[in-house]
Amino acid sequence: MSNKNINCLLFIFTYDLRNFIIIMHKNLILKGIFLLLIGCETTAPITKIKEILPEPTEKVIYQPDENTSIANKEVLDETEIEIEVQDFLAIENYIQKEISSVISTYGNFNFSKKDEIYELHRYNANKCRIFIQNNTSNKKIISITIFHIEEKKVLKNYKKDLCH
């Protein structure tokens, strides 16, 4: 290669390097300006939010008089109401029978949940809950579970003395 060719190549490479350095300086200056602008914008909304939101205050909606609450307690003490709970003796014998026979004997359920395949019903008996599960299609009872709430035990048979 001749001397002219080498000089031409060196000129091209140095020209590109000089332009590269100038472009890098311009990019750094632009990035610095953008950072300053963005930094100022992120701090501005915080002060505005505090001005917009009011401080929460405690608000009393209802406060009964002391005289009325004492009078109500006296009335409740004087009238002791005894709630009669139905006797569910021999309810465990209704397995594989129709659900309508249980309703006709013991009355409507306290709670019912119906699904596509099964239905779940509940009777409340003071300290016990009686759960009855049946098929939705044929209304036959699948299982009867008697659960004692306080002892957290499942009973095989309903016992009035345990559930009252």
Image: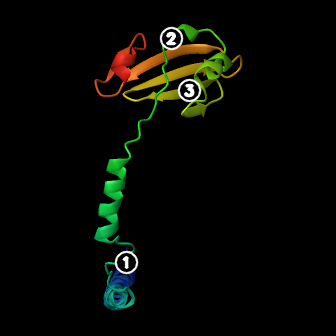
Q: Which residue is mark 2?
A: 92
Judging depth in this view, the residue of 116 and 33 nearest the camera is 116
Q: Position of residue 32 (x, y in %)?
A: 31, 88
Residue, disc 3: 120
Q: Residue furthest right?
A: 137
- Give the percent coordinates (x, y) of residue 42: 34, 85
Q: Of marks 3 and 1, which one's residue comes earlier in the chain?
A: 1
Q: Report the mark closest to the observer, 3 or 1.
A: 3
Location of the N terminus by quadrant is bottom left
**Which element carries disc 1, helix, strand or loop?**
loop
- Disc 3 element: strand
Mark sitting earlier along the chain (3/2): 2
Q: How many marks?
A: 3
For the C terminus, the quadrant is top left
Q: Separation of disc 3 and disc 1 at Cα?
A: 100 Å
- Residue 78 x, y percent position in the rendering: 34, 49
Residue type marked 3: Leu
Say which residue label 1 marks.
2
**For residue 66, what is the image quadrant?**
bottom left
Amino acid, disc 1: Ser
Point 32% across, 84% down: residue = 55
Name of the residue lying farthest toward the front: 78
